Amino acid sequence: MATDKNSVIENRAYARIGLLGNPSDVYNGRTISLSLGNFWASVKLEPSDYLMIVPHPSHDLVQFDSLSHLVNRLQTDGYYGGVRLLMAICKIFHNYCKDNNISLHEGGFKLSYDTNIPRQTGLSGSSAIVCAALSCLLDFYQVRHLIKVEVRPNLILNAEKELGIVAGLQDRVAQVYGGLVYMDFDKKLMDELGHGKYTPMDLDLLPPLYLIYAENPSDSGKVHSTVRQRWLNGDKFLISSMEEVADVALEGQAALIAKDYAKLATLMNRNFDLRRQMFGDEALGAMNIEMVEIARRVGAASKFTGSGGAVVVLCPEGSSQASLVEDECKKAGFSFQQVQVMPSFLTQVDLETMS
Ligand SMILES: Nc1ncnc2c1ncn2[C@@H]1O[C@H](COP(=O)(O)OP(=O)(O)O)[C@@H](O)[C@H]1O
Ligand SMILES: O=C(O)[C@H]1O[C@H](OP(=O)(O)O)[C@H](O)[C@@H](O)[C@@H]1O
Ligand SMILES: [Mg+2]
């Protein structure tokens, strides 16, 4: 990657799968997540005399065929695209550098993005856009060596918090680190370090995994805000269930290391069952629940990759079972793909910032 301040910079960030423990990352828990090579967002930074955030031609649509086209679009995709995400990370990055005496040159830039991550499907399309933008800013200002890898997920999360999106760190950690990562967000640890403890795991430990998803925009921030408020209010059931979800990741780490995939399957199912009890069927949505059940009906294990819209599947009986899931997905109109894990692409400069 060229880091000359006059050259065009382009960076990608991949979708992610919360394999175990999500959403306990939002609640001082633990997760195991992986970077998903099947989908990515890319951000391009072109040096310029002025500063411009370029709206995406379809994700930030502002021109419509008719009033009903506009209304239809708002009803399916909501009001927001990626522009606000790019603006927010620019602000967070600027303020972080100012607070940490990192000086930035005066050059301007044009920032544009593209993404093939299915929109708002719990594959972390939102933080992929932010993460790729942060990478461009690190390169443009040549400050990659000054901003530790461990704190980058916080900056990405803060950009979304800035917009009122309730979320946790696991997506952002998977996207910054790449590969497969075990994460511990223990409160004491977070208070002491300002971030969680992130331990990369060997990709060879993973069994083949599959993905089911649907065009199904649901706002993860909204899904989380009520549960988060109940948790903050001290709801005992939520607090103890969230601890159980965090324990799923702890047990999952041992299961992965032992390549005990029967245990991994049990833990994935348990993870979703706990989410279902905590959030309730109405909040999860009938289509999302059906995606989980389609896999379970043929004996596979399944859970949400994020807050809903996509499901990760483990087939303990192998590829013949995966074909059965695929057939069922076709009948139901859901997309089905084998998971490609994206290995870490942290550079030497990045690695040297790590404590
Ligand atoms: N594909 C996309 N293109 C443009 N903006 C997106 C896209 N996906 C998400 N966003 C932006 O991120 C916000 C939060 O999305 P979120 O519900 O977290 O989706 P995801 O599950 O993909 O992370 C949305 O309100 C929107 O502003
Ligand atoms: O609910 C979850 O599992 C995750 O929800 C959000 O991710 P998204 O891909 O936007 O659905 C959130 O950002 C994560 O921290 C949660 O674990
Ligand atoms: Mg998101």
Image (spheres, helix red, strand yellow):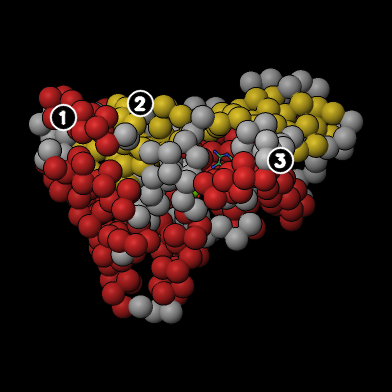
- Give the Cα separation between the discs numbered 1 and 2: 20 Å
Query: Residue at coordinates 34% horizontally, 62% vertically from top-left?
Result: 282
The disc, 2 or 3, on the residue closer to the chain's N-terminal end is: 3
- Give the Cα separation between the discs numbered 1 and 3: 42 Å
Query: Residue at coordinates 56% horizontally, 57% vertically from top-left?
Result: 165
Q: Residues within 10 Å of mark 3 (few under 14, many from 20)?
A: few
* In front of the other: 77 or 40: 77
Q: Is residue 280 visible?
A: yes
User: Quarter holding the N terminus?
Assistant: top right
Query: Residue at coordinates 46% horizontally, 29% vertically from top-left?
Result: 39
Residue 108 image offset from top left, x and y in percent: 84, 34
Residue 81 image offset from top left, x and y in percent: 62, 43
**Residue at the disc numbered 2:** 340
Q: Residues within 10 Å of mark 1 (few under 14, many from 20)?
A: some
**Residue at the disc numbered 1:** 324
Q: As shown in the figure, which amino acid type bears the numbered disc 3?
A: Val
Residue 109 image offset from top left, x and y in percent: 80, 32
Q: Secondary structure at mark 3?
A: loop
Q: Which mark is residue 62?
A: 3
Q: Residues within 10 Å of mark 2 (few under 14, many from 20)?
A: some
Q: In the picture, residue 11 is in which quadrant?
A: top right
Q: Is residue 213 left or right of residue 177?
A: left
* In front of the other: 63 or 47: 63
Pointer 1 and pointer 2: residues touching (CB < 8 Å)?
A: no
Q: Is residue 337 left or right of residue 215?
A: left
